[in-house]
Image: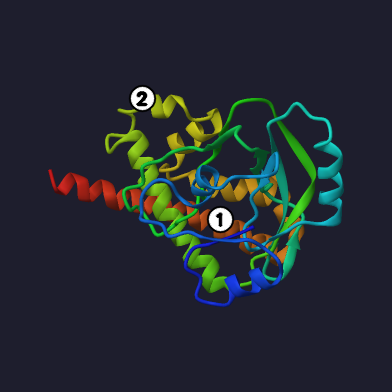
Amino acid sequence: MVVDSGSSDATCAIAREAGAEVLVFAWDGKFPKKRNWVLQTYKFSTKWVLFLDADEFVSEAFKAELADVLQDTDCVGFWLNYERWFLGKQLRHGDEFNKLALFRVGAGAYERIEENQWSALDMEIHEHPVLDGAIGEISAPIEHNEYRGLHHYIAKHNEYASWEASRTLCLIGKDRGVKYESDEWQGLTPRQQAKYRHIAKWWAAPVYFIRGYIFKGGFLDGAAGFHFALGKAIYFYQIRLKLKERHSLCMSNE
Protein backbone atom coordinates (compact mmCIF):
# COMPACT_ATOMS: atom_id res chain seq x y z
CA MET A 1 0.00 0.00 0.00
CA VAL A 2 1.30 3.45 -0.94
CA VAL A 3 0.15 6.56 0.92
CA ASP A 4 0.64 9.65 -1.25
CA SER A 5 0.30 13.23 -0.09
CA GLY A 6 0.40 15.48 -3.10
CA SER A 7 3.32 14.10 -5.10
CA SER A 8 3.90 15.94 -8.37
CA ASP A 9 5.46 13.07 -10.30
CA ALA A 10 4.09 9.73 -11.51
CA THR A 11 4.22 8.01 -8.10
CA CYS A 12 0.53 7.12 -7.95
CA ALA A 13 0.37 5.81 -11.52
CA ILE A 14 3.54 3.73 -11.14
CA ALA A 15 2.34 2.30 -7.83
CA ARG A 16 -1.04 1.30 -9.25
CA GLU A 17 0.57 -0.26 -12.34
CA ALA A 18 2.75 -2.34 -10.01
CA GLY A 19 -0.34 -3.62 -8.19
CA ALA A 20 -0.19 -1.45 -5.08
CA GLU A 21 -3.21 0.10 -3.43
CA VAL A 22 -2.85 3.89 -3.34
CA LEU A 23 -4.31 6.05 -0.59
CA VAL A 24 -4.33 9.81 -1.09
CA PHE A 25 -3.76 11.93 2.01
CA ALA A 26 -4.35 15.69 2.20
CA TRP A 27 -2.99 17.19 5.42
CA ASP A 28 -4.77 20.20 6.92
CA GLY A 29 -1.91 21.09 9.29
CA LYS A 30 -3.56 19.45 12.28
CA PHE A 31 -3.76 16.05 13.92
CA PRO A 32 -3.71 13.40 12.52
CA LYS A 33 -0.70 13.32 10.24
CA LYS A 34 -0.07 10.67 7.62
CA ARG A 35 0.70 7.51 9.59
CA ASN A 36 -1.92 8.05 12.28
CA TRP A 37 -4.44 8.85 9.57
CA VAL A 38 -3.80 5.47 7.97
CA LEU A 39 -4.08 3.69 11.32
CA GLN A 40 -7.36 5.45 12.03
CA THR A 41 -9.06 5.17 8.64
CA TYR A 42 -7.76 2.07 6.87
CA LYS A 43 -9.26 -1.38 7.52
CA PHE A 44 -6.25 -3.67 7.64
CA SER A 45 -6.55 -7.30 6.60
CA THR A 46 -3.17 -8.14 8.14
CA LYS A 47 -2.14 -8.55 11.79
CA TRP A 48 0.95 -6.35 11.40
CA VAL A 49 1.78 -3.02 9.78
CA LEU A 50 5.28 -2.04 8.62
CA PHE A 51 5.91 1.61 7.82
CA LEU A 52 8.54 2.28 5.15
CA ASP A 53 9.65 5.66 3.84
CA ALA A 54 10.23 6.11 0.13
CA ASP A 55 14.02 5.89 0.63
CA GLU A 56 13.93 2.64 2.62
CA PHE A 57 14.35 -0.81 1.07
CA VAL A 58 13.89 -4.24 2.64
CA SER A 59 16.49 -6.97 2.07
CA GLU A 60 16.03 -10.71 1.71
CA ALA A 61 17.68 -11.13 5.11
CA PHE A 62 15.18 -8.77 6.70
CA LYS A 63 12.21 -10.55 5.13
CA ALA A 64 13.54 -13.94 6.25
CA GLU A 65 14.01 -12.82 9.86
CA LEU A 66 10.61 -11.16 9.82
CA ALA A 67 8.89 -14.34 8.64
CA ASP A 68 10.66 -16.35 11.32
CA VAL A 69 10.10 -13.98 14.25
CA LEU A 70 6.45 -13.16 13.59
CA GLN A 71 5.39 -16.80 13.56
CA ASP A 72 5.52 -16.99 17.34
CA THR A 73 6.00 -13.81 19.35
CA ASP A 74 4.42 -12.13 22.35
CA CYS A 75 5.71 -8.73 21.24
CA VAL A 76 3.35 -6.08 19.92
CA GLY A 77 6.08 -4.09 18.15
CA PHE A 78 9.67 -4.25 16.97
CA TRP A 79 12.57 -1.82 16.76
CA LEU A 80 14.11 -1.95 13.28
CA ASN A 81 17.74 -1.26 12.37
CA TYR A 82 18.77 0.64 9.25
CA GLU A 83 21.83 0.82 7.03
CA ARG A 84 22.73 4.46 6.42
CA TRP A 85 24.22 5.89 3.25
CA PHE A 86 25.80 9.33 2.89
CA LEU A 87 27.64 10.89 -0.07
CA GLY A 88 27.29 7.59 -1.93
CA LYS A 89 28.95 5.50 0.78
CA GLN A 90 27.44 3.12 3.30
CA LEU A 91 28.18 4.21 6.85
CA ARG A 92 29.10 1.20 8.99
CA HIS A 93 30.00 3.09 12.15
CA GLY A 94 28.87 6.11 14.16
CA ASP A 95 25.48 6.54 15.78
CA GLU A 96 22.99 3.79 15.16
CA PHE A 97 19.77 4.49 13.30
CA ASN A 98 16.70 2.60 14.47
CA LYS A 99 12.95 3.15 14.56
CA LEU A 100 9.90 1.46 16.06
CA ALA A 101 8.18 1.05 12.70
CA LEU A 102 6.65 -2.43 12.89
CA PHE A 103 3.75 -3.21 15.21
CA ARG A 104 0.51 -5.13 15.55
CA VAL A 105 -2.58 -3.50 14.11
CA GLY A 106 -4.54 -2.08 17.03
CA ALA A 107 -1.62 -2.15 19.49
CA GLY A 108 -1.28 1.62 19.51
CA ALA A 109 -0.50 4.67 17.41
CA TYR A 110 1.98 7.50 17.08
CA GLU A 111 1.93 9.98 19.95
CA ARG A 112 -0.39 12.92 19.50
CA ILE A 113 1.33 16.30 19.32
CA GLU A 114 -0.65 19.43 18.59
CA GLU A 115 1.71 21.13 16.16
CA ASN A 116 -0.19 24.35 15.39
CA GLN A 117 1.38 24.66 11.93
CA TRP A 118 4.96 24.33 13.20
CA SER A 119 6.18 23.12 9.81
CA ALA A 120 5.16 21.56 6.52
CA LEU A 121 6.01 18.03 7.73
CA ASP A 122 2.85 16.02 7.03
CA MET A 123 4.26 12.72 8.29
CA GLU A 124 5.26 11.63 11.78
CA ILE A 125 9.03 12.23 11.75
CA HIS A 126 9.83 12.71 15.43
CA GLU A 127 6.64 11.32 16.94
CA HIS A 128 7.06 7.91 18.55
CA PRO A 129 4.61 4.98 18.54
CA VAL A 130 2.93 4.44 21.90
CA LEU A 131 2.20 0.72 22.17
CA ASP A 132 0.57 -1.43 24.82
CA GLY A 133 2.81 -4.48 25.25
CA ALA A 134 6.32 -5.86 24.91
CA ILE A 135 8.72 -4.49 22.29
CA GLY A 136 11.31 -6.62 20.47
CA GLU A 137 13.97 -5.99 17.84
CA ILE A 138 14.66 -7.19 14.30
CA SER A 139 18.42 -7.46 13.75
CA ALA A 140 18.61 -7.67 9.95
CA PRO A 141 18.81 -4.07 8.69
CA ILE A 142 16.67 -2.14 6.24
CA GLU A 143 18.59 -0.07 3.68
CA HIS A 144 18.08 3.68 4.14
CA ASN A 145 19.47 5.45 1.09
CA GLU A 146 18.59 9.06 0.29
CA TYR A 147 18.96 9.54 -3.47
CA ARG A 148 17.85 13.15 -3.79
CA GLY A 149 21.18 14.76 -2.96
CA LEU A 150 22.51 17.22 -0.42
CA HIS A 151 20.14 20.04 -1.37
CA HIS A 152 17.13 18.00 -0.29
CA TYR A 153 18.99 16.54 2.71
CA ILE A 154 19.93 19.98 4.07
CA ALA A 155 16.48 21.47 3.40
CA LYS A 156 14.82 18.52 5.13
CA HIS A 157 16.97 18.86 8.23
CA ASN A 158 16.30 22.59 8.33
CA GLU A 159 12.60 21.70 8.61
CA TYR A 160 13.39 19.10 11.26
CA ALA A 161 15.37 21.67 13.28
CA SER A 162 12.45 24.11 13.22
CA TRP A 163 10.10 21.35 14.38
CA GLU A 164 12.43 20.38 17.23
CA ALA A 165 12.74 24.00 18.36
CA SER A 166 8.97 24.39 18.47
CA ARG A 167 8.54 21.08 20.23
CA THR A 168 11.15 22.02 22.84
CA LEU A 169 9.45 25.33 23.60
CA CYS A 170 6.11 23.56 23.89
CA LEU A 171 7.55 21.06 26.39
CA ILE A 172 9.70 23.22 28.64
CA GLY A 173 8.32 26.70 28.07
CA LYS A 174 10.26 29.89 27.45
CA ASP A 175 11.48 29.83 31.07
CA ARG A 176 13.17 26.45 30.51
CA GLY A 177 11.85 24.21 33.20
CA VAL A 178 8.41 25.40 34.18
CA LYS A 179 6.72 22.44 32.48
CA TYR A 180 8.92 19.58 33.71
CA GLU A 181 6.09 18.33 35.95
CA SER A 182 3.42 18.36 33.23
CA ASP A 183 1.65 15.17 32.14
CA GLU A 184 3.08 15.60 28.65
CA TRP A 185 6.63 15.76 30.01
CA GLN A 186 6.07 12.75 32.27
CA GLY A 187 4.86 10.80 29.23
CA LEU A 188 8.24 11.10 27.53
CA THR A 189 10.80 8.32 27.68
CA PRO A 190 13.95 8.96 29.76
CA ARG A 191 15.91 9.35 26.51
CA GLN A 192 13.44 11.96 25.21
CA GLN A 193 13.53 13.86 28.50
CA ALA A 194 17.33 13.93 28.42
CA LYS A 195 17.29 15.26 24.85
CA TYR A 196 14.88 18.10 25.55
CA ARG A 197 16.60 19.05 28.80
CA HIS A 198 19.93 19.54 27.05
CA ILE A 199 19.15 20.28 23.41
CA ALA A 200 19.57 24.05 23.89
CA LYS A 201 22.90 23.80 25.72
CA TRP A 202 26.00 25.17 23.96
CA TRP A 203 27.77 21.84 24.31
CA ALA A 204 25.00 19.69 22.77
CA ALA A 205 26.31 19.92 19.19
CA PRO A 206 30.03 19.26 19.94
CA VAL A 207 29.14 16.42 22.32
CA TYR A 208 27.03 14.80 19.59
CA PHE A 209 29.94 15.10 17.16
CA ILE A 210 32.47 13.63 19.62
CA ARG A 211 30.10 10.81 20.58
CA GLY A 212 29.32 9.75 17.02
CA TYR A 213 32.62 10.46 15.29
CA ILE A 214 35.04 9.32 17.99
CA PHE A 215 33.39 7.09 20.59
CA LYS A 216 31.03 5.39 18.10
CA GLY A 217 33.77 5.02 15.49
CA GLY A 218 32.43 7.33 12.81
CA PHE A 219 36.02 8.17 11.85
CA LEU A 220 36.33 4.63 10.47
CA ASP A 221 33.98 5.63 7.63
CA GLY A 222 36.54 8.11 6.31
CA ALA A 223 35.52 11.45 4.83
CA ALA A 224 31.85 10.46 4.55
CA GLY A 225 31.80 9.64 8.26
CA PHE A 226 33.34 13.00 9.14
CA HIS A 227 30.94 15.00 6.99
CA PHE A 228 27.94 13.06 8.28
CA ALA A 229 28.90 13.61 11.94
CA LEU A 230 29.63 17.28 11.28
CA GLY A 231 26.31 17.72 9.51
CA LYS A 232 24.42 16.21 12.43
CA ALA A 233 26.29 18.45 14.87
CA ILE A 234 25.34 21.48 12.75
CA TYR A 235 21.74 20.26 12.89
CA PHE A 236 21.77 20.38 16.70
CA TYR A 237 23.47 23.79 16.58
CA GLN A 238 20.65 25.02 14.31
CA ILE A 239 18.11 23.88 16.88
CA ARG A 240 19.95 25.82 19.60
CA LEU A 241 20.06 28.99 17.46
CA LYS A 242 16.38 28.72 16.58
CA LEU A 243 15.54 28.32 20.25
CA LYS A 244 17.60 31.39 21.13
CA GLU A 245 15.90 33.38 18.37
CA ARG A 246 12.41 32.40 19.53
CA HIS A 247 13.28 33.03 23.16
CA SER A 248 14.50 36.53 22.25
CA LEU A 249 11.30 37.23 20.29
CA CYS A 250 9.17 36.10 23.23
CA MET A 251 11.08 38.37 25.62
CA SER A 252 10.88 41.37 23.27
CA ASN A 253 7.12 40.96 22.91
CA GLU A 254 6.49 41.04 26.67
Colouring rule applied to residues: rainbow
Q: Mark 2 points at which residue?
A: 182
Count of picture labels: 2
Question: Do residues under tags 2 and 1 come within 8 Å of each other at their CB atoms?
Answer: no
Name the residue at the top extreme: 181
The mark nearer the N terminus, 2 or 1, is 2
- At x 37% / y 26%, what residue is drawn? 180
Which quarter shows the N terminus? Answer: bottom right
Q: Where is residue 125 in the image (x, y as percent from the top left)?
A: 52, 50
Q: At label 1, which amino acid type do we have?
A: Lys
Which quarter of the picture shows residue 15?
Answer: bottom right
For residue 176, which quarter of the picture?
Answer: top left
Instruction: Give residue 91's position: percent from left, percent from top.
Output: 73, 59
Image height of 142 relative to 70, above or below: below
Picture coordinates of residue 115, whole percent (x, y): 36, 46
Q: In which quarter of the image is the C terminus?
A: top left
Residue 146, label in figure: none
Work out whether residue 38 or residue 187 is closer to the camera in this orientation and state it: 38
- The residue shown at (18%, 44%) is 251
Mark 1 secondary-structure assignment: helix
Task: Tell me residue 119's x, y (percent).
Answer: 38, 56
Q: Which mark is residue 232?
A: 1
229 vs 112, left or right, is right
Q: Farthest residue in the bottom direction?
A: 9
Q: Which amino acid does label 2 sit on?
A: Ser
Does dot 2 land on a helix, a strand or a loop?
loop
